[in-house]
Image (cartoon, rainbow, N blue to C red):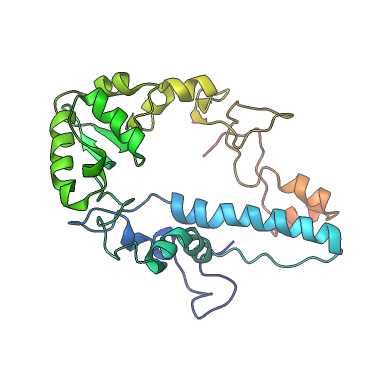
Amino acid sequence: MTGWGQDGPWARSAGHDLNYVAMTGALHAIGPADGPPSIPLNLLGDYGGGATYLVMGLLAGLWQAGRSGRGQVVDAAIVDGVAHLMAGVHGFVNAGLWTDRRGANLLDGAAPFYRLYVTSDGRHVAVGGIEPPFFQEMCRLLEVDLTPEQQHDPAAWPHVERTLAQVFATRPMDHWARLFDGTDACVTPVPSVAEAEDAAHLRARGTLGRDADGRLGPAPAPRFSRTPTTTPTRPVPPGSDTRDVLDELGLDADALIAAGVAHQIDPRGDLP
């Protein structure tokens, strides 16, 4: 896996997640209309466009090699993966359904039924009721008089946004979390990373948990029916598996480690 790919004029140039995401146009599309683009952590580039596509490429390569008897190089470039993740947006653009500006489209915060609202305690709730039945369920629970016609009429969006913003600003985030819990209104709180551990649904599924050392982290995903596991594992320091991998490949692990070609860390050692 590389940032710019195995070939191209920038193949040997330095870069990081933000650079790759920026080059694809994805970064330009993320953020408020009246502000700069928002950095989507390194979830979109390194993990989404990079690691995910590398895994898919390796699995596809192994499947093909098992049938053809021939191997091949998997060129998983982060910039390619992010561009591929933007296929849906390109489809909207080509159909004339997407404006090439931030905060001006259905899924980028312009629509009042798909955005964040501030609560009375300065926190936020996420509203995602795109379909009319979900939007109407939210309106029913909020006791506001907004119609399906207003929902999908851009001319009415400022009124819809003001109405929802005023209501959500009257109560703290936890109040709205309780009100919408288990409903089809598509309204959820926006907890912090640490607070997410206490989300009832995530706790019931074991989505987040503690490893043997008490560290909070995600459980393995996806899950498998025959080999289930939901316990977060202790992070493994780089180099912990070096000897096992070299042995599996039939290479002289001791010689390579002694020569400094391979690096090994005792997997039982403390994390840095």
* Residue 253 seen anywhere in this rendered image of the structure: yes
Identify the image quadrant of residue 175: top left
Query: Measured from the top left, where is residue 18 in percent x and y?
Result: 39, 60
Q: Examine the rendered structure and indicate whether residue 8 appears above or below residue 145.
A: below
Residue at the (63%, 67%) spot, across then down: 75
- Left or right position of 119 against 260: left
Residue at the (25%, 55%) spot, across then down: 103
Choose between 210 and 85: the one closer to the eye: 85
Residue at the (78%, 51%) spot, across then down: 246
Identify the image quadrant of residue 259: bottom right
Query: Measured from the top left, where is residue 28 in percent x and y?
Result: 32, 63
- Left or right position of 135 against 71: left
- Left or right position of 154 against 197: left
* Residue 173 seen anywhere in this rendered image of the structure: no
- Left or right position of 69 against 216: right
Residue at the (30%, 36%) spot, across then down: 127
Q: Examine the rendered structure and indicate whether residue 147 appears above or below residue 110.
A: above
Q: Examine the rendered structure and indicate whether residue 146 appears above or below residue 265.
A: above
Rendered-image quadrant of the N terminus: bottom right
